[in-house]
Amino acid sequence: MKFEHTPVLLQESIDMLDIKSDGIYVDATLGGAGHSEAIAARLDAGRLIGIDRDANAIRAATEALLPFGARVTIVHDNFKNIKDILKRCDVGPIDGALLDLGVSSHQLDEPSRGFSYMTDAALDMRMDRSAPVSAYDVVNGYSEPQLSRMIYEYGEERWSKRIAQFIIQQRQKTPIATTGELVRVIEAAIPKAVRTEGGHPAKRTFQAIRIEVNGELTILKQAIQDFADALKPGGRLAVITFHSLEDRIVKNVFSSLEKGCVCPKDFPICVCGARPTLKVLTKKPIISGDEELSANTRAKSAKLRAAEKL
């Protein structure tokens, strides 16, 4: 299946990066290379480093970015390893970086990846298919308290305890092996009267499992700090999120790095010595306009935040 992904908030992201033709930039989530193509097209003597942990994305991006030649370096890795990646690429401080978080359209649309609750497939949900833990392992291996907590915290699902109970009951009979089987368990767990609230009844649970399988939130805070460290003065970091949990982390880390000092509020003077390292450029997140929303429904939940290195 061809790797296709419509880049969200494309122009807004490019504007926020304020690209210099001789600058060094990182696209930390290559996907279908839509953002990368726009960045590379604006470079002359500059360089783009594109990163993705999905082998399909790496193959598609390699082909799409061929016209840009040596300006582009593609790395199959997780963006959480950004400091090591830059060292391996013999790159010092960078001029900008973009993180487009979440699952790509291709991953959702390819049934065999097991990300979607709309098609029946093997439970997988790994962005990096060489990773040892899949959705099958989580659904069939976690305890009831672990499942309940995960679904509540990562899916913000109020029926998390009941869903966890139903999963345990079902897997005692036979393992839950496919997305379709899991959807049926979730639908049975959620009372019929509220199943249509907030979209598909499995949406929040699938989000929670995907986040857990890929460690999406556990790596995000440190990754943002590492990207901020990698920027040269005046360099910019832009982050696109797709749900409130991600956006909250980005907002809080940006705010913390802008504030610097971590001393208690009742301290008369700063004793920690921490200094501000970022200037937040988006006091409120940038969201998609009506034209983009009508053309791409997956842009509905997208939020863009950006900051500049002091």
Image: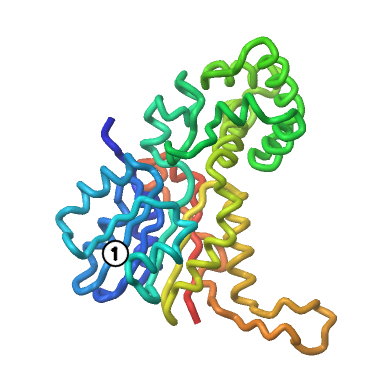
x%, y% of residue 269? 78, 89
Q: Which of the 4 image quadrants contains residue 248?
A: bottom right
Q: Residue furthest bottom?
A: 269
At a point 72% along the width and 31% down the height, the residue shown is 160
- Answer left or right for 37 relative to 216: left
Q: Is residue 194 above or below residue 209?
A: above
According to the image, label 1 marks what residue? 48
Q: Which of the 4 image quadrants contains residue 299?
A: top left
Label 1: state its secondary structure: strand
Looking at the rendered structure, the kind of residue marked 1 is: Leu
x%, y% of residue 298? 44, 41
- Answer left or right for 41 relative to 102: left
Q: Is residue 277 above or below residue 97?
A: below
At a point 49% along the width and 29% down the height, the residue shown is 124
x%, y% of residue 104? 41, 41
Judging depth in this view, the residue of 87 and 188 nearest the camera is: 87
Q: Is residue 187 above or below residue 205?
A: above
